[in-house]
Amino acid sequence: MSLPEPRQFLLDLYASAVNAVSADKCLPAFLPERPANGRTLVIGAGKGAAAMAKAVEQHWQGPIEGLVVTRYGHGADCQKIEVIEAAHPVPDEAGRHAAARILNMVQGLSENDLVLCLISGGGSSLLALPADGISLEQKQAINKALLRSGAAISEMNCVRKHLSAIKGGRLALACAPARVVTLLISDVPGDDPDIIASGPTLPDATSCFDALAVLKKYHIEVPDNIRHHLESGAGETPKPDDPRFARNTQHVIATAQDALEVAAATADAAGINAYILSDGIEGEARDVGIVHAAIARQVAKHGQPFKAPCVLLSGGETTVTVRGNGRGGRNAEFLLSLAVALDGHANMYALACDTDGIDGSEDNAGAVLAPDSLARAAGLGLSAKAMLENNDGYGFFSALDDLVVSGPTRTNVNDFRAILIL
Amino acid sequence: MSLPEPRQFLLDLYASAVNAVSADKCLPAFLPERPANGRTLVIGAGKGAAAMAKAVEQHWQGPIEGLVVTRYGHGADCQKIEVIEAAHPVPDEAGRHAAARILNMVQGLSENDLVLCLISGGGSSLLALPADGISLEQKQAINKALLRSGAAISEMNCVRKHLSAIKGGRLALACAPARVVTLLISDVPGDDPDIIASGPTLPDATSCFDALAVLKKYHIEVPDNIRHHLESGAGETPKPDDPRFARNTQHVIATAQDALEVAAATADAAGINAYILSDGIEGEARDVGIVHAAIARQVAKHGQPFKAPCVLLSGGETTVTVRGNGRGGRNAEFLLSLAVALDGHANMYALACDTDGIDGSEDNAGAVLAPDSLARAAGLGLSAKAMLENNDGYGFFSALDDLVVSGPTRTNVNDFRAILIL
């Protein structure tokens, strides 16, 4: 079999990965039975919420209604389920209003009713509704302090859940006594349902006491009303043994691993061995790029740990510590760091894209890298290293006309990276 | 075959890796013919220089003399070759004096004479001799500015070579017309001989013009005497086509890859499949730890890209951006980050040690990690995450009595990392 054209090959892998985790493809198999004598309500939040709602509409037998909230631009054309677009990652009034309407909509349901809750990454920001007596500004201030503190995601989620009117299982309680079936597209390493979008319909194993301990551990000062909210137990979340969750179920319908597996199969079909390094790589994007480059060099130089030709795949969510004033998301930053570390190495091509189609807050999903990228950039008077220092991955790949622009994909299993070594 | 005891298994891998790249084992095969009618002089610098000199003494037939410089504590008991100990990584007067004596010693040789030059990592600091008219303090100031600038190692070496009286091939020129055979133990990714210890006996492809371009690129101001040294061409290094190098040869006798290959064979012999991820991983130690953790988790959860039980091996040189005031080198930092990211994952053990036996400027080579390390630390009131924030890897593993203390190994192929997944 002849070797594939590298750029198109990588774009094909990305397309196959995204398609594998689209709501249209993944959701129908997980639809529950229609309730015999009750209503079916659809609610949800996240970058994939509108596409999930549309998939429900297309495959549901019987009457259905509801409301989901998604990010601006990630909407879909639904007939029966209302779709509201709101701001992400910083919540806005549209999201707060949608969250209040959803909570209101599930009041007064009976035990014969079914609530289908459609959750995907981004849902946490889109469903930001502070608990009574707490302002959105107060929650945002604590959020920022947590982000600065070095607290783990699990610790931040613990605090967030205990200051929310909807997270940490409260949305499911509001639905009681109706049965709640939650379908989730996971964008978190480990695919833990109660972490995705801070688990609005899942019980919470942590307590107000834990939230206070996190605030103390990281020396985060909070206003008196919030301290009282936690100390009084007013912010307590429902626990896993709560009988009100007994009839509820949840299914993670799509994960980063699913996307990577299908991309690997696509590569295999093209005659290229694929190796999945990890479905959940975290860490600073530029350092993750350096490590990927080192592994790719080992393949080329020593045939270890894999023989070329092959493609290395990985998922997860890197972070970018902004030092410059350039443009670009974490995938562009990863790829530019990879470019610098590979230094124009022959026969190596790469793609890094966000599976939601939007790399950070730009208009691209990511970018592609070829052995001649650095030389072409130099021909334009651009230094990859200097642009990396300035966090200007978007500028670099834009100048080379090497951005990948897909528009919102309406799903989200986080980053997708592929390095082809011929 | 039964599974090995994890801790001893990892220590055995490390010992086998270090032994594989010891001068005693690697050097004899590369010794040249004894000159028919001339003297044999041995010179050298680096953490392995004394052990290399001793290996030469033990295997050389005929008269021999010379002088090598090594780091304090890395000396060896030589009979004919003088061993001087000096400071690393910040040069001191002992090193400068040794460099001057070496340059003096090789004056007046004939074309019948042979110079054996023994180079290993650390040699650059140990052989710090500024060019005429440049002070050590001036070189140090430029060095610091380069380190801050984000310049690549190759760019920093270019400047250093053009401000030195001994680097960039000048030492070999001083030996002319004698033949120079350089034996090198590599501590640099790529194992390029003219990068190891800034190549004192290897011709230099870069020029004074290149050095000036680096200084301009990174906006580094230099005193007039240094600018004149470069602009006048007084700092020019000998080039690869220089006929005075025509009879010289060099051999890289030991590399990180060699160490990793032997460790892999040791693991295989114990019934554990070993996979070498890379012999040259760079990047921030804590992020490198996070990526290694993600790959290890993929092995445990999905049997990708390798099936457990197995051991993942890697080499290279990470960096630590110091943010706290704790103790520890880059291997302890890597391992503590790995510990936090693995979060007590069952059946995972790891070791990270510097092959020179000294992790940074501490008294340990590195440390070992076990599934119960975090819990044992918590029992002592220690938080791995907080200690990582404080760059206190040494403190963490010291409290657990999990440091690996080998003392100087007298060789140096950089970091050695092994993660065992049972």
Image: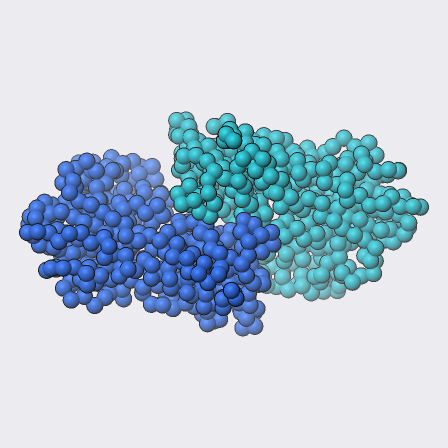
Chain colours: A cyan, B blue
User: Left or right: A164 with respect to B247?
Assistant: right
Along the line of sight, which residue is nearer the eye, B84 or A224? B84
Along the line of sight, which residue is nearer the eye, B89 or A35? A35
- Locate residue A186, reporting x and y percent: 67, 46
Q: Is residue B109 visible?
A: no
User: Left or right: B141 with respect to A259?
Assistant: left
Residue, far front? B1
- Locate residue B112, reporting x and y percent: 7, 48
Q: Residue at x 60, y 51 (%)?
A: B302
Q: Residue at x 73, y 58 (%)?
A: A204
Question: How many numbered circles are shown?
Answer: 0
Along the line of sight, which residue is nearer the eye, A203 or B105? B105
User: Left or right: B362 with respect to B392?
Assistant: left
Along the line of sight, which residue is nearer the eye, B213 or B239? B239
Q: Compared to A9, does A126 lie above or below?
A: below
- Locate residue B338, reporting x and y percent: 51, 58
- Locate residue B243, reporting x and y percent: 14, 37
* Residue B380 in which image quadrant: bottom right
Q: Residue at x 88, y 38 (%)?
A: A62
Q: Is residue B251 visible?
A: yes
